[in-house]
Image (tube, rainbow, N blue to C red):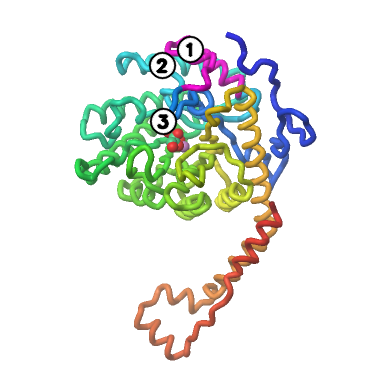
Amino acid sequence: MTDFFEGMAPLRFDPEAEGAAFRHYDPDRVVMGKRLEDHLRFAVAYWHSLAADGSDPFGGPTFLRPWAGEGMAAARAKADAAFRLFEILGVPFFCWHDADIRPEGVTFAESRRNLEAMVDYFAEKMEGAKVRLLWGTANLFTHRRFMAGAATNPDPDVFAWSAATIKACLDATHRLGGENYVLWGGREGYETLLNTDMGREMEQMGRMLSMVVDYKHRIGFRGQILVEPKPQEPSKHQYDFDVATCYGFLQRFGLEGEVKLNIEQGHAILAGHSFEHELALARELGVLGSIDMNRNDYQSGWDTDQFPNNVPEVALAYYEVLRAGGLGQGGTNFDAKLRRQSLDAADLVEAHAGAMDVCARGLIAAAAMLEDGRFEQARAERYAGWDAPEAQAMLGSDLAAIAERVEREGIDPRPRSGRQERLENLVNRHL
Ligand code: XUL
Ligand code: CO
């Protein structure tokens, strides 16, 4: 098969370059004591960049990739193209679902063997490459058997199939040295309450997640287990609605110390939040695991999974990440796909290169905001009253004692400006 990326060399950092290059992303640039590559930990999403064919609900495939096809030979050709793309982009990571990398077999056992054979092929290719596995995951939503959910299915045989699939995917992720394992439950929810036993379904989901954690420890997998919140789409309602809902779920099943979250920009917007809100909340709750970076179309409101191009938004997101101490074992996965008319190899490369530049600009701006110090100073000043011993004592007090003190001391609160616009203007100076 001819090289889809024929003539393309690894991209360099060159702000003056005419052709494809990084204009802001210099992997070796040190920001807050760490290389940009180590801060951002970029990953290519196999499903969007290698497996997707450009089809949408109104039209069939447009991409017609040379590796498209059904069998193992096609899967290996796809992997060859993938590793060429990783090399050109110089990304340190990639991510996959089982269904992206192996052909579906006639039986479960055949699918598992196909996966194992592809994992062998990946392991071989990774030996000579820089790229590593950020995370693996199971596709428990495309095949019709999952139409009523995976762990939450009313049919116990689907629960069994899903458990066996997750086991195979965890084994594969472990074998490839993956740093995380993700669970995203697109069909773990309902289409109508009229036929749904919500209590039973959430119990099943909690048991499945507990079994995943048990199995992780049994095989000695060191990666993080991550749940990816999303409020709806494809289901009308999904139980992993947002960070707050997921945290409540983890607490209910005693898993908050074992499972963290993979937070996606577009999913935050679908849930009616900003990306930075979800990241800040996850940080406060100690469950910030990794991020899926993309953007939605704000007019359609749909989860359009476009590559990021809004530096101010990305900067506010990385500001929350840096306040959390960074991405740790997580990374920045481009869960983003080309538009249907973007057919060429150049589109795939430029989409990623542009997104990596946007993220680099965002992270550099976020670091400057932190180093500026005035944001954290303003925050500290705003809460300074709570440093007083009587304020702290009040938190251990009771309503009657507080009421007595209000009258005795003649407490009369004086409203103070929140200085929002001043802080927003200050953000602008770092962009
Ligand atoms: C779907 C989505 C998934 C997960 C992995 O909206 O984000 O691609 O990231 O299953
Ligand atoms: Co995602």
Q: What residue would you read off at disc 1?
A: 74
Q: Is residue 374 magenta?
A: no
Check disc 2 and give the amino acid type. Answer: Pro
Judge whether 88 appears above or below 253 on screen. above
Residue 42 in the image: above or below residue 71 = below
Cα separation, mark 2 vs mark 1, equals 9 Å
Vertically, is 146 above or below 416? above
Q: Please provide the residue range marked out in magenta.
A: 61-85
Residue toward you, 338 or 423: 338
| Residue 75 x %, y % | 47, 15
* Residue wearing tag 2: 103
Structural crowding at the residue carrying mark 1, measured as other residues with C-alpha within 10 Å and reported as few (<14), some (14–19) or many (≥20): some
Q: Helix, strand, or loop for circle 1?
A: helix
Residue type at the position of mark 1: Ala
Q: Which mark is residue 57?
A: 3
- Label 3 CA crowd tier, 10 Å (few <14, some 14–19, many 20+): few
Asked whether residue 133 is in view, the answer is: no
The residue lying at 65 percent from left, 30 percent from top is 350
**Dot 3 lies on which element?**
loop
Is 76 within the magenta?
Answer: yes
